[in-house]
Image (cartoon, helix red, strand yellow):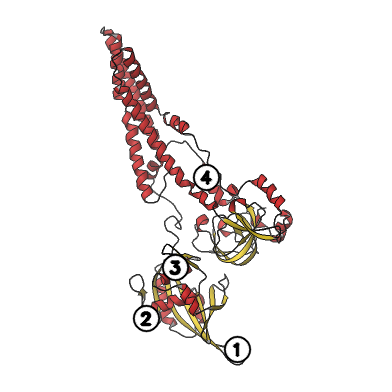
């Protein structure tokens, strides 16, 4: 059985690893020898000479090379010293081959970006100590310690968990963070995206913390299997290549037949043997479409450049022709057709009109966004005057809207420090935070409108329902935000007044 099909107790028993202690140095060394480093294997690249010789295997190219050889031979045999024709043919063949090799080499360099995933650090338990190591040093059986904001460096089974949510968009295309749980036990046919007790290399921890028993590293990971597919080299020819080869063969055979016929007729008429041979060779070279491959290569190279400007990497030139013949392209939208970056488009606060914040930010809309921003767990950093927001995509969109309008999450948290929280979970489907507000307390809750609706005691919920329906009909994500101000009396109890404040929508 796979790790996601086992309970934690069974996994620990079978692995013979103490989850509280981790691996010993001797065991780590043994597993390094058995499993190797935690990195993707690089494709065994063909040498330049091999690539060059492969490019000369085309039938038309062979005819040209033979013609060039004959041209050089006759130039030497007749002592006339005219090597221009042979040099021109060789130059055409070289240009065609070099263009293809250089372009494919540039594309291969771009694919090496996958290796950057391994330029990371990892926190693991070893010999009873929590230590930080290079991600490449992680081995199956290690106990990974994960915190918010970390990247997962290996596949593993969750053994400890505290409100852990993982962004798996890079692997599965799912834009929403996946809530993980230790108690989940999957079936044999459980899809990758539904294995809620597993984390995978290349994904990111958006919330919470946990510990993971590493089950796979390097090429054995799910991300490694994707890298392996990219490394597979196939020499299958595209329809265009096949048609060009067929056309080249037919024209070349016709040219050779015509050259032979001319030579034969010349001999019947008593023409000099060498002169007729030169005439036949010249006719064959003139008839062979030596520039056809050059024109096609240049056209495909131009297509590759245009695709690169649109951030699409073409590994092999003929693939441009294959894309050109595609009628339907099926693709998951997240990360392919979109960037997995949501934005707040419109905000509604009770008693006001809907505000399109892309065109105008009002004080009322900012108030709703500030309440919502306080109720998030995202991390905000700044690099080269650029705001970097890490965390749940929905929460990141809210905070980004605040940061882009001359406010910061840090100043809000300083003004209203958080003193308590009830994290989002799949049962409540909402998140609640409590903040100190002078001598009082501010409780903020955000979540799906239909979940929060029964909890509102004040506010124009009827109008809110109308606005929610209007947003929903546009297939937009709607987040409801409510608050309650509390006071603590002498008996220590809390008096609460809950109120609906507004809606914000994302796309």
Query: Where residue 413 sits: x, y (%)?
Result: 50, 76
Is residue 500 in sight in this rendering?
yes
Q: Is residue 422 toward the left or the right of residue 66 in the image?
A: right
- Looking at the rendered structure, the secondary structure element under dot 1 is loop
**Crowding at label 2, few (<14), some or many (≥20) Cα neighbours within 10 Å?**
few
Quadrant of the rendering where the C terminus is positioned: bottom left
> Regarding mark 2 in the picture, which secondary structure is present there?
loop
Q: CA distance from mark 1 to mark 2?
A: 34 Å
Q: Residue at x 38, y 79 (%)?
A: 363
Q: Nearer the viewer, residue 351 or 116?
A: 116
Say which label, 1 or 3, has the lower sequence index.
Answer: 3
Q: Earlier in the sequence, mark 1 or mark 2?
A: 2
Question: Which tag, 1 or 4, sits closer to the chain's start?
Answer: 4
Q: CA distance from mark 2 to mark 4?
A: 54 Å
Q: State the residue position of label 4.
A: 229
Q: Earlier in the sequence, mark 2 or mark 4?
A: 4
Q: Where is residue 74 shown, x and y percent of the image? A: 33, 15
Under tag 3, what secondary structure? helix
Point out the frontmost of discs 2 and 3.
3
């Amino acid at each position: 059985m796979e790790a996601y099909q086992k309970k934690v107790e069974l996994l620990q028993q079978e692995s013979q690893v103490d989850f509280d202690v981790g691996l010993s140095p001797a065991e780590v060394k043994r597993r390094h020898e058995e499993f190797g480093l935690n990195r993707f294997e690089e494709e065994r690249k063909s040498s330049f000479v091999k690539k060059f010789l492969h490019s000369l295997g085309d039938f038309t190219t062979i005819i040209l090379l033979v013609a060039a050889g004959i041209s050089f031979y006759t130039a030497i045999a007749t002592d006339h010293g005219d090597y221009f024709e042979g040099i021109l043919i060789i130059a055409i063949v070289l240009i065609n081959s070099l263009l293809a090799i250089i372009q494919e080499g540039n594309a291969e360099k771009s694919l090496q970006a996958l290796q950057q995933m391994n330029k990371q650090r990892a926190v693991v338990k070893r010999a009873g100590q929590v230590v930080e190591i290079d991600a490449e040093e992680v081995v199956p059986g290690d106990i990974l310690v994960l915190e918010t904001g970390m990247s997962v460096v290996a596949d593993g089974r969750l053994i400890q968990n505290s409100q852990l949510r993982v962004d798996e968009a890079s692997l599965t295309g799912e834009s929403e963070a996946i809530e993980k749980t230790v108690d989940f036990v999957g079936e044999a046919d459980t899809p990758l995206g539904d294995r809620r007790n597993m984390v995978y290399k290349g994904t990111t921890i958006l919330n919470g913390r946990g510990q993971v028993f590493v089950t796979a590293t390097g090429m054995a990971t799910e991300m490694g299997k994707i890298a392996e597919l990219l490394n597979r080299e196939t020499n299958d020819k595209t329809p265009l290549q096949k048609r060009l080869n067929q056309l080249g063969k037919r024209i070349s055979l016709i040219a050779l037949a015509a050259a032979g016929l001319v030579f034969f007729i010349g001999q019947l008429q008593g023409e000099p043997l060498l002169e007729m041979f030169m005439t036949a060779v010249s006719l064959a070279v003139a008839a062979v479409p030596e520039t056809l491959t050059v024109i096609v290569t240049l056209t495909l190279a131009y297509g590759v450049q245009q695709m690169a400007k649109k951030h699409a990497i073409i590994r092999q030139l003929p693939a441009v022709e294959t894309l050109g013949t595609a009628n339907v392209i099926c693709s998951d939208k997240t990360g392919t057709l979109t960037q997995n970056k949501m934005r707040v488009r419109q905000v509604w606060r009770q008693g006001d009109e809907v505000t399109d914040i892309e065109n105008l930010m009002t004080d009322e809309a900012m108030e709703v966004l500030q309440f919502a921003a306080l109720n998030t767990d995202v991390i905000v950093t700044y690099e080269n005057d650029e705001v970097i927001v890490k965390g749940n995509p929905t929460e990141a969109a809210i905070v980004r809207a605040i940061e882009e309008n001359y406010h910061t999450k840090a100043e809000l948290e300083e003004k209203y420090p958080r003193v308590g929280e009830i994290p989002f979970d799949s049962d409540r489907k909402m998140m609640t935070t409590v903040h100190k507000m002078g001598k009082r307390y501010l409780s903020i809750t955000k979540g799906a409108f239909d979940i929060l609706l029964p909890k509102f005691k004040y506010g124009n919920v009827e109008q809110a329902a109308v606005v929610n329906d209007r947003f929903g009909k546009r297939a937009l994500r709607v987040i409801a935000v409510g608050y309650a101000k509390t006071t603590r009396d002498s008996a220590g109890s809390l008096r609460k007044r809950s109120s609906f404040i507004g809606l914000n929508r994302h796309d």
